[in-house]
Image: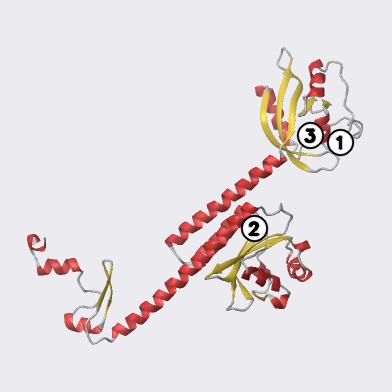
Amino acid sequence: MKIMQRKDIPDFFRLLKEVLDVGLFLTTPEGLVLDANRAVLKMMGIEREGQHTGAVEVAECYVDPSQRKALMEELREKGVVRGRVMRMKRLRTGEPFWARINAVAVKDDRGHVLCVLGTVEEVEEEMRQRELLERRRAIVEAMAFSAEDLLRSSRTQELFPKLLTRLGEAVGVDRAFLFRRKGWDDTVVLRYEWAAEGISPLLRDGAFPGEIALRNHGLGRWAEAFARGGMIVGDVEVLPPREREFLQPLGLKSVLFIPVRTAGEWTGFLGFAQQRSRPAWTSDEINALRWAAGLIAAATERRKMEEALERERELLLETLKDAPYGVLLVEGRRHIFANEEFTKITGYTLQDVPTVSEWLHKAFPKKAMRE
């Protein structure tokens, strides 16, 4: 980097350059770099002075140059900017990174900015951790909303699409889907899917079979992993050849498949896929998404139990319908069943049979008698 020399650069800046580890810079109001220490050079991907020929425009260092303009407007108005986190880029490679900037405007007696003195610190890891925490919070929030929906209703045909949408958006993937295992072999059926904005659903494209026999497609490892409670996770390019042959034509670059297990058996799997590169899945994300698979299993079990109870109820009512004695079934304060014999004996149908309270009022007209 060729640094322009000016005789009026403050001596204290030259001193700070030698003693501070944090990035230190001095620029003109127009955005020309006057001086910078070694930390800034290294941060910008330049190991020593002279590697970058020509004067450096500060705008070159920003992913979005308009941020530099906004920074200068605030400096002219307030004189100082503290802790501003911005997206910067390395000059030699163009690689983006997060940086925190503190800057002060050096002004003359008339308030005109003479130069800008500031520090810059790379905070890539800090922002990555913040992003991971935000994703985990979003996943947990999505599950909380879905669990609340489950308490209100067991209609999985409504619950599961909402859950996939919430989880897909929270995790920041391109696709989320739920497969159901068909019977007890290794065939799975795509029941629900979600695709991010601008991504076509797999079934709509017609490029994906709705039903997959895992072993026939070279995906037997998936079934074996699901049976053990294991997962399939990672970049597609490092998966076994047959799995790559299946996934790459779908445009998938990274996947996470988590089994849904009920009564000790895998009954399907919850899947997430990315068509673009993404950071590696973290243990926090995976654990949170395992909870989501558990929520799906709980919802499925509840639906099966309710279906079993409904079948028993229908069988009971069918039996009582032709009973030789009168039968009236009450649920809470509602009459839910009256057979023909009951109608013959009392003259009441299910629609006009009085409630217990009405019967008491007729049998004991006086309030004192009822009490």
Work out how far the residue at label 3 is from the one at label 1, CA to CA, in angstroms.
Answer: 16 Å
Residue bearing mark 2: 196
Residue 259 vs residue 113: left or right? left
Work out how far the residue at label 2 is from the one at label 1, CA to CA, in angstroms.
Answer: 38 Å
- Callout 1: 10 Å neighbours few (<14), some, many (20+)? some
Sequence order check, earlier mark of 2 and 1: 1
Residue bearing mark 1: 46
Residue 318 vs residue 141: left or right? left
Report the amino acid beneath label 2. Answer: Ala
Seen in the picture, residue 165 relative to 92 is either above or below; the reply is below
Looking at the rendered structure, which numbered label has been put on residue 59?
Answer: 3
Residue at 64%, 53% in the rendered image: 283
The residue lying toward the viewer, choosing from 227 and 241, is: 227
Report the amino acid beneath label 3. Answer: Ala
Residue at 74%, 26% in the rendered image: 118
- Callout 3: 10 Å neighbours few (<14), some, many (20+)? some
Q: Position of residue 68 (x, y in %)?
A: 73, 32
- Callout 2: 10 Å neighbours few (<14), some, many (20+)? some
